[in-house]
Image (cartoon, helix red, strand yellow):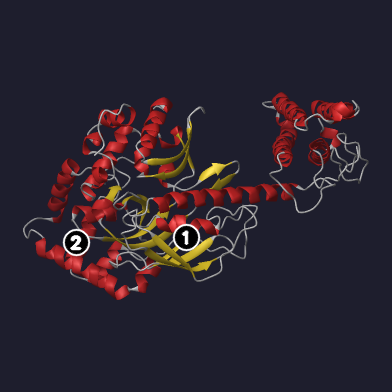
Amino acid sequence: MDHAMGCPRCGVQAQEYCRRDDGRSRAIPHVKRLTLIIAHHLITIAVPADRETAVVHDALLLLQATAALKASDGPDGKKEQESEVLLQTARLQLHVQRALATVNGHTLNVREQMEQAGDLYETLVLTRRTAELLHDDQIQPSHAIIEPPTLQEVRSWQELIFNDELRQRTKKRETIAISGQDPQLAPACWHITCHEPNGYFEARHRDERGLLGPAYCGWVPVPEAIPEVLRRWSVPAARPIDVTWECTPVWPEALLPYGGCWPDHRNHDPEHTRTADSTGAEVWQDNAERHRERFADMMHQLRRRWPGEQSVTEFLQEAATRLNATQPQAPSLRPQLTCAEHRHEQDLVGLGYSVTAGWIDPAAVANTGTRQWNGFANHRPGTVPAMTEALLSGDVDHALKVWNILDAPIQVVRVHGPAGPLYRLGENGAHRLHAARLLDLPAVWVEIRQNALPMQLTVADVTPDGAPIEAGLRVACWRGLFDRGLLTGRLDADTTFGVLHLDAVLAPWMLTQPEHAIEWAAVYNRVYPGALNEAGVPTAAWQDAQAWLSWLTNGGLQSP
C-alpha cells in the first residue's frame, strides 16, 4: 500500500487533494485516508516485517478492506460519517493489545518483540487521538496534508492546543480572583523584569514591612499565568495586584518541560536552563545589613529573657511539653494539595510557581514533617540545643554559621489562606524550625515556594497514606464547599475517585478529610484569630470532624 494512496472516502487518486461533497478541495485529508496512511506507515517503521505479528497484519488488512468497501457503496456510502473509521482504529488498537497479551509473561526470547509492540500500541493511541482532533476540526495545520505527518508534527499540534487550554484556565482564574478583590485595598505592585523562552521569570515586589523579597523568581508554562502565580502572595488574599512588564513576554511554541529545565524532556532547550530554585542567599544580599541587624536583635532579646539558672536542655523540654499540649502541629497534607503539577499523559503540567526568601512567623508553620515538637530523639538530638547555645553566645557570625542561613536555607511551602498564609516544611530545615518555635523567636529566615493551585485533584490525591479512600464522603464535602461559596471549579463525580477541576478555594487544606481539615483550621485560627469566621467558616464548624462533616453536608450549622 503506497503511503500516498488515494482516498477511500472521496475517491481521489494518489497525490490529489481530498474533495468535499460539493467538489471543493479539502486542506485536511478525510479521516479514513489519514488513518490508513498513518497506521500503515507506523507499522512499517515500528515493526520489521520478519517480526510483524499476524494479528496486527490482519487487523490492518481488515481496516483497509472495510474502508475500501465503504467507498464503493455508491453516493449513500460516501456520505457516511467519517467518525465510523475511528471505530476501525479502535479495533486495530484492540488487536495490538491482544498481541501484547499473547507474549506477556513468556520467555526472554520475545522481550524485543514485546517492546516493539508496546511502542507500536502507544503510537496507535496517539494516531487515534490525532484523527479525532482532525475530525473535530480542533487542529488546523498551516498547510495541506497529503503525506502523513510525523509524530513530532502531531505532538506539536496537540501541545499548542494544550497551551491554549492553559491560557484559558489561567484567564478563568484571573476573572474569579478579580471578582473577589477588595477595592478598598491598595494594589500590590509587581514588576516583571525577565521572562525567558523556557518559562523562567523574575519579578520584584517591595514588601511594605520589609519581610519578604523584594526579588522573586518563578516558572510558568505560558506568560499569561504569571499574574495567577504572583497574586497568590497577596495578604490578605483579596488584595488586588498591579503587574507591570519591563521585558517582552515570550510565548512558547510547544509544551514546556515543567520547571523549565528537564534534559530528558523532548522540548528541553539547552540554551535556556535557568530554574527558580534557590534564592535565599541572593535575597539576603539585597539588604544584608538590615537582615543581619534583625538576626542580632533576636539574639539579644533571647538572652535578655532567658531564665538564668535553667539549662538549655531543661528549657527546651519544658517548651516542647507546653507546645505539644497547647499548640500541636497539624497533620501532613498530601503533596498534591500544595503542589501545582499533575500528570497529563506522559507529562507533568501545571500553572507554575514562584520562589523568594524572607522572614516569617514560626508560629505560622503548621507542619514540620513530625507531629511532636522537638521529637528528634533518634535524629540528631543535639542539633536544636546547639542552635540555642549559638544564639545565646552573643556571637552573630558564629550563630549565623551554626544556623547555616545562607548556604542551606530553611525551605518552606506556602499554604495560602484568606488573611495570610500558613507554611509546611519543604525539603530542608526541620531542626531550625523547631528551634525557632521552642525559643519563641518572632521571625525566622526561610526560602519560600508558592505554587499555583493544582488544576485538578482526585479523592485519592487528598486522602492521607493508609487511610481509606472514601470517595462518596469526600465528594459530598466538596459539594458543600461549592454550595457555601468557598470553592470554585467543576466536579466530575461520576469517575471512580471523583475529579475536581480547581479554580479557587479559600484554603487548600479544606479539601482534605475532616479529621485533618479541622486541625489545620485550629492552627489557622491561632495565627489569624477570627479570620475563618469572617470568611464564612464558623468556629463551631471545626471543633471536631463530625461538626465539619455536618456543616458541609447537612447544613447543620449556620454561617456567620
Residue 218: mark: 1
Q: How crowded is mark 2: few (under 14 residues within 10 Å), some or many (20 or more)?
A: few
Q: In the figure, is residue 424 to the left or right of 85?
A: left
Mark 2 lies on residue: 389
Q: Residue at x 83, y 41 (%)?
A: 41
Q: Specify the farthest residue to the right.
A: 13
Q: How crowded is mark 1: few (under 14 residues within 10 Å), some or many (20 or more)?
A: many
Residue 426: x %, y % from top left: 38, 51
Vertical placement of 290 versus 368: above or below? below
Q: In which quarter of the image is residue 70?
A: top right
Label 1 secondary element: strand
Q: Which residue is drawn at 24% across and 69% down?
A: 294
Q: Which of marks 2 and 1 is in front?
A: 1
Vertical placement of 10 versus 527: above or below? above
Three-letter code for the amino acid on which mark 1 is drawn: Gly
The image quadrant where one finds the N terminus is top right
Residue 297: x %, y % from top left: 19, 69
